[in-house]
Structure formats: C-alpha cells, structure tokens
Image: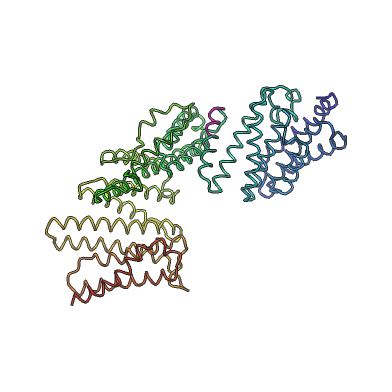
C-alpha cells in the first residue's frame, strides 16, 4: 500500500467506516415509522467518502480501485437492506467492473466472492433462481480455483481495506475469510436448490454447510440444530433412515452440550429458555416423523408380503426381491455421511434404523416416539399452539394405527383404535372450525376412518361368536359415527351459490369421504329387509352422485380410477340386490 493511500485510509476511510458500522448497529432499534433511518445516515457516510475518493482520480491504481470496489459493495448491501434492490444491484455491478473476475488477484478474491454471494441473494429474492445459481456457482468456482494457490488471499474487507491496511499482504486470516464465505455460498446454494424443487442438491449443500460449520466452530447451536433436523426430514422422505437418525442424534448432542454451557444464561433470560425449549419440541416432532415413516414402510411391506405369498412365482420385474429387500439394499448403498466432530454412537443406539418385522420391534419404535410425543406436547400446549398440538395428536394417532397392524389379538387392536378415537375426538371438540378449519377437516376424516376400522374389528369378533342385539347395536353406532364424521368433512365445503366449493387440493379427499359414506351404508347390520333396502338406496344414491361429480371435475379421475370403477360396478349391482329384498 502506497504512503498516500495509507494516510488517506487512516485519516478518512477508517473513521468514516467505523461511523457507518455504528449506524448499522443501531438499525434494529429504529422506530417503526422510520425503519431505515440508521441505514440512511450510514449511507450518507459511505457516499461522501466515495465522492471524496473519486475526486482524487486514482482509478488507475489497483489498490485505490479495490478500495472503491469495497465501498461500493457495502453501499450495495445498504441499498438492498433498505429494499432498494435495483440501486443495490447497480452498485454491485459497478463493483465487479473494478475487479478481475476471471483471474482474481489475492487481494480481490474475497471481495468478489462477497459480491457474487450478494448477487445470488438478490436474484433469489426476486424469484429468479437461475440467475441466483449463476452467481452462487461462480462464487463456488472462485473458491475452488483459488484453493490451489500457495499465496493466501487477503481477508474480508472489514478486516483489511477498510480497517487494517497491513492485512492486505500475506495474512493467514485470508484463508479464514475465504472459508467462511464459502460456507455462506454453500448455505445459499442449499436454499436456492431447495426452493426450485431440487431437493437432492439442496440436501447435499445443506449437509456440506452444516459439516463446515462444525469444523470451523462458527455456528449458532440452536440454528444449526434446526437446519440439521430439517435436513433429516429429507432423508426420511427418501427412506434413508440411517442418515436421518445420524442427523437427529447429532442435533440431540449439540443441544445437550449447548444446554450445559448456557444454564445460567437461560435462567436469566426467559426468551432464550423458551427458544431452547421450542427447539427441543421441534426436534421431538422430527423424531416422531422418523418413527412413523419407518413403521409405515414396514406396514407396506407386510401388505406386499401377504400379496406375494398368494402368488406362485415372484415378479420378474423385481428379480424376485421384495420391497423390503430393495429398501435394505438402498440403506447399504447409501452410506452415512457422519459429522466426524461429534460422538453420537450412544445416541444412535437408542433407536434402530431397520423397519420392524414383528410386534416387539414395532413397539420399540412406538414407545420411543410416544416419549417424544409427550415431550413435544409439554411445550406445544393446546391453548397457545393449537395447530402444533393438533398435529402432534394426529401423529400419536398414526402411531397407534401403525402399531395395531402388528398386533395379533383383535381385542388389543380394538383398544388401540379406541385410543385413537378418544384422542382425536377430544381435540376435535375443543377446536373452533371457524378458526381451525383445515385442522378440523383433517380430524373429521381421521375420525371417520378410526370409527370404521373399529367397527370392522368388532365385526370380525361376531364371526366367531353368536351376535347379540347389544353387539349389533354397538357396531351400527360405530358405523353411524364414522358416517357422521365423513359427512361433517363433506359439509365443510358447502357453499350458497353452488352445492359444494371444493379447492383442487381437496378434491381427492372429498370424493373419498363420499365413497366412505356410500360404503358404510352397505355395512349397517339391518333389522329387516325394509331397513336394509333403505340403506342400500342411500348407498346407490351416493355412488351415482360420485360419478356425476367426477364428470364435472375431470382432473380428479386419474387419481381415483379404481374407486370410480367400483362405483360403476355398484351402480349396476345394487338395484338387483334391492329387487331381491322384496
């Protein structure tokens, strides 16, 4: 650095930049009526400084140009923070004109990475993911290309050009700055890819970000934990349960260490304690989803196995392998990418990764998840977090439903279905549909299913013992409750101008609820022919209604073609059945 530039930085740049940082620190406290007041004052400091530098006409000098580029980067970020994105973009473009973007010098590369990261954020906010990726991938390339050089880059502009001119040359802090910026690049790439629907790349970059944060030690434990727990849900959705378990066990480890180190802070800061408690509850919900997903895979396998046992030869398209065998191979092929800084073997040992094949194995998942259910409900209480609480109760209900698939005793299956009905009905009675319509619809549909499944179980009992008036009456009451809940779901879409106003996202569930109603009328145990004929006529009317409704909503037909075939078949068969009941 020349003596002239060094003197100018000492006398004008450093004091002005410190003043800018002081204004920036006050920004969060700006009043609502003037949300950017501090940023505007800080901007004035930067603009005056830029004007004074450009008046010196030193643009040909590289270091003077680097100083101007660094200030324009800060000015561009200021405009963007003030929601003046077009002005911010212009400043960033001017910044790039002053730097060697293709073959950056050591004192330029960190500034360039910052500019491209900022451009990536800007275009992502404008819902232009392709342009965002162009800049972010360029920032990644800058990092990868420069890492082969022996000479360290200059550190971030806050520690160099604008504060400490001695750090511009051969300072090891430059590597730290570059590594930190690259971690931010990966984080932004994870967000953009996820938002564009490329979940696989989003997960890849997210995992890389989390890993680098652990390696550097520069991360917020709660923020890191939430991102890692969210990442686990991607692996769960892809049946990569070993990787999902490692993520969640790592979260438990990080949060436990953070809690031990911050007991005094949480005791003095109620908001911090609440933030930690909510994070723990959120992670518990992720563990619940983990167990539900594994049990769901296992139940699906049980059904497939039953079907395969009825066949004389295996399906050649799968080389004779079952879905479960495919899943096991998938788990083996997808090796777990571990966070080497964390020791979580003991935490992982608490819960398995293989789908259960018997009741005892399924019960271990159930009990682990049920413990998480109770912990999550202790934070997400009904009065304050009604939607969260309802979601947890629904997950608890799903756990009972899945566990019942492994139970052999019908009486115990009945008790599990009864538990589902009690917990779902309890919360359904406490929620106001005007405020929680979506949740209430879900509860009505699930209650309809639970009542029907319990009625079916009771019918299997009657196949082994002589029916009594009391047992028949109980089955009919269960079927009536099932029908009432499905009808409640359907009627939640009633409208004045038209019979029903059903959003496209609900069309499938709406038709299925009607189909359940029709099916239930054919299952009632009637006391005589006239009552049975009346029930069959109601079922026939509903089947006919479903066919007419789907004719008006052609888009839904491919999703329910098999159900429509059943409707058409029943429309042909039921009139004959009615005729036989004379």
On whether residue 213 falls in the magenta region, the answer is yes
- Give x and y (percent) for residue 107: 73, 29
Task: Point out residue 133 in the picture as x, y percentages from the top left corner.
Answer: 62, 44
Quarter of the image where the N terminus is located:
top right
Does residue 245 appear in this view?
Answer: yes
Residue pictured at 56% horizontal, 44% vertical: 193
The dominant secondary structure in magenta is: helix
* Relative depth, front residue between 513 and 489: 513
Question: Residue at the location (54% across, 27% down)?
Answer: 215
Quadrant containing the C terminus in the rendered view: bottom left
Asked if residue 267 is positioned above or below residue 477 in the image, the reply reads above
* Image spot of residue 204 (x, y percent): 52, 38
Residue at image coords 31%, 57%: 449
Rendered view: 364 above or below 14: below
Q: Nearer the viewer, residue 504 or 367?
A: 504
Q: Quadrant of residue 247?
A: top left
Residue that extends furthest to the left in the rendered view of this protein: 466
Against 19, residue 499 (above or below) is below
Determine which quarter of the picture holds residue 22. top right
Query: Can residue 517 be found in the magenta stretch?
Result: no
Q: Quadrant of residue 297?
A: top left
State left or right for residue 11 relative to residue 348.
Answer: right
Numbered range of the magenta stretch: 209-216
- 454 on left or right of 254: left
Closer-to-camera residue (120/455): 120
Q: Is residue 415 visible?
A: no
Viewer-nearest residue: 120 or 525: 120
Residue at the spot x=45%, y=32% of the render? Answer: 250
- Residue 309 in the image: x percent, y percent? 24, 48
Q: Is 329 drawn above or below residue 482 in the view shown?
A: above
């Amino acid at each position: 650095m020349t003596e002239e530039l060094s003197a100018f930085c000492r006398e004008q740049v450093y004091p002005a930049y410190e003043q800018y940082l002081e204004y920036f620190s006050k920004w969060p406290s700006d009043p609502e009526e003037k949300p950017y007041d501090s940023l505007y004052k800080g901007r004035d400091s930067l603009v005056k400084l830029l004007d004074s530098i450009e008046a010196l006409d030193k643009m040909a000098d590289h270091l003077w140009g680097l100083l101007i580029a660094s200030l324009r980067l800060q000015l561009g970020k200021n405009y963007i923070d003030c929601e003046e994105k077009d002005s911010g973009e212009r400043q960033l473009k001017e910044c790039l004109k002053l730097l060697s973007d293709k073959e950056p010098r050591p004192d330029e590369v960190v500034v360039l990475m910052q500019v491209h990261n900022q451009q990536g954020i800007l275009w992502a906010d404008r819902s232009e993911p392709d342009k965002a990726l162009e800049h972010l991938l360029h920032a990644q390339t800058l990092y990868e290309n420069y890492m082969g050089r022996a000479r360290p880059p200059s550190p971030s502009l806050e520690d160099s050009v604008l504060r400490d001119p001695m750090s511009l040359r051969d300072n090891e802090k430059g590597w730290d700055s570059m590594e930190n910026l690259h971690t931010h690049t990966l984080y932004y790439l994870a967000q953009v890819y996820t938002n564009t629907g490329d979940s696989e790349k989003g997960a890849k970059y997210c995992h890389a970000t989390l890993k680098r944060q652990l390696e550097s030690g520069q991360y917020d434990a709660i923020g890191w934990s939430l991102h890692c727990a969210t990442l686990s849900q991607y692996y769960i959705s892809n049946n990569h349960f070993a990787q999902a378990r490692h993520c969640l066990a790592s979260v438990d480890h990080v949060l436990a260490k953070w809690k031990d180190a911050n007991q005094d802070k949480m005791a003095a800061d109620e908001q911090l304690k609440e933030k930690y408690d909510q994070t723990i509850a959120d992670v518990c919900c992720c563990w619940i989803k983990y167990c539900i997903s594994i049990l769901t895979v296992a139940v699906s396998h049980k059904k497939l196995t039953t079907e395969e046992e009825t066949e004389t030869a295996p399906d050649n398209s799968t080389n004779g392998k079952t879905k479960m065998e495919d899943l096991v191979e998938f788990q083996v092929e997808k090796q777990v990418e571990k966070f080497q800084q964390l020791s979580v073997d003991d935490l992982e040992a608490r819960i398995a990764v293989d789908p259960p094949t018997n009741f005892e194995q399924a019960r271990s998942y159930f009990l682990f998840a049920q413990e998480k259910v109770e912990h999550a409900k202790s934070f997400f209480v009904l009065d304050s977090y009604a939607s969260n609480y309802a979601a947890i109760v629904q997950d608890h209900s799903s756990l009972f439903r899945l566990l019942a698939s492994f139970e052999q005793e019908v009486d115990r299956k009945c008790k599990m279905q009864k538990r589902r009905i009690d917990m779902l009905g309890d919360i359904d009675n406490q929620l106001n549909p005007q405020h929680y319509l979506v949740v209430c619809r879900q509860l009505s549909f699930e209650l309809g299913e639970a009542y029907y499944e319990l009625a079916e179980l009771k019918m299997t009992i009657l196949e082994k013992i002589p029916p009594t008036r009391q047992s028949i009456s109980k089955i009919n009451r269960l079927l009536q409750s099932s029908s009432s809940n499905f009808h409640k779901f359907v009627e939640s879409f009633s409208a004045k101008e038209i019979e029903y106003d059903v959003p496209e996202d609900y069309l499938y569930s709406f038709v299925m609820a009607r189909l359940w109603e029709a099916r239930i009328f054919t299952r009632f145990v009637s006391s005589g022919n006239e009552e049975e004929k009346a029930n069959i006529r109601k079922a026939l009317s509903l089947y006919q209604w479903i066919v007419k409704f789907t004719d008006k909503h052609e888009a839904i037909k491919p999703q329910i073609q098999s159900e429509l075939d059943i409707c058409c078949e029943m429309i042909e068969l039921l009139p004959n059945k009615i005729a036989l009941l004379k």
